[in-house]
Image (spheres, rainbow, N blue to C red):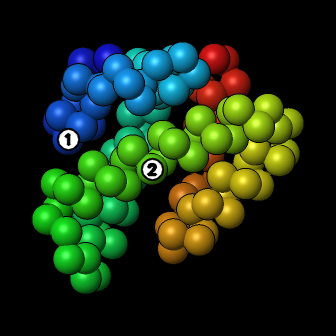
Amino acid sequence: MNKDLPIIIKKVFANPDPIIWQGIWLSTLESLLKDPKMLKVWEKLISVFKAKHGQGSSLHLNQYMKWELKAFVAQIVKLKVANENHDTFIKNLDGYFRRKGINLDNTLIYEIYRVADEI
């Protein structure tokens, strides 16, 4: 885990449940957490999720963040397992963010792909 990760990321993923986080799930999570270029992605996601929470979630902020961050990693795993090519991965990840009402810069989406593709 990258020592420079935001505290909420460290807390959410500090002790991943070994029943869920194994195989490709664990390797994907570890790659996303250790790559220094993912710091910008994590910071942006935290910012966006905090803003979306403020728009009216019934969950406490920490629970909401935990839910959304894990859903993000699950989406990356899903796309990785589907073994999509570059364009399809990018298109599907962009679609995921749009369905959630998140406008993420393409450079960040490409960075996520780059990290996921190395797994």
Query: In this image, 33 relative to 73: left or right?
Result: left
- The residue positioned farthest toward the bottom in the image shown: 56
Residue at left offset 46%, top offset 32%: 38
The residue under label 2 is: 71
Decide which of 35, 14 is in the foreground and name it.
14
For the residue labelled by badge 1, is the local secondary structure a helix, a strand or a loop?
Answer: helix
Decide which of 80, 55 is in the foreground and name it.
80
90 in relation to 31, above or below: below
The amino acid type found where label 2 is placed reads Ala
Query: In this image, 67 relative to 27: left or right?
Result: left
Disc 2: CA contacts within 10 A as few (<14), some (14-19) or many (>=20): few
Query: In this image, 55 relative to 92: left or right?
Result: left
- The residue positioned farthest toward the front in the image shown: 19
The quarter holding residue 89 reads top right
Decide which of 27, 97 is in the foreground and name it.
27
39 in relation to 75, above or below: above
* The C terminus lies in quadrant: top right
Residue at left offset 16%, top offset 54%: 62
For the residue labelled by badge 2, is the local secondary structure a helix, a strand or a loop?
Answer: helix
Task: Where is residue 23? Give x, y as percent.
Answer: 54, 17
The residue under label 1 is: 8
Inspect this view and state whether residue 84 appears. yes
The quarter holding residue 12 reads top left
Residue at left offset 23%, top offset 23%: 15
Task: Where is residue 71? Give x, y as percent.
Answer: 45, 50
Discs 1/2, front = 2
Q: CA distance from mark 1 to mark 2?
A: 15 Å
Task: Where is residue 44? Give x, y as percent.
Answer: 39, 51
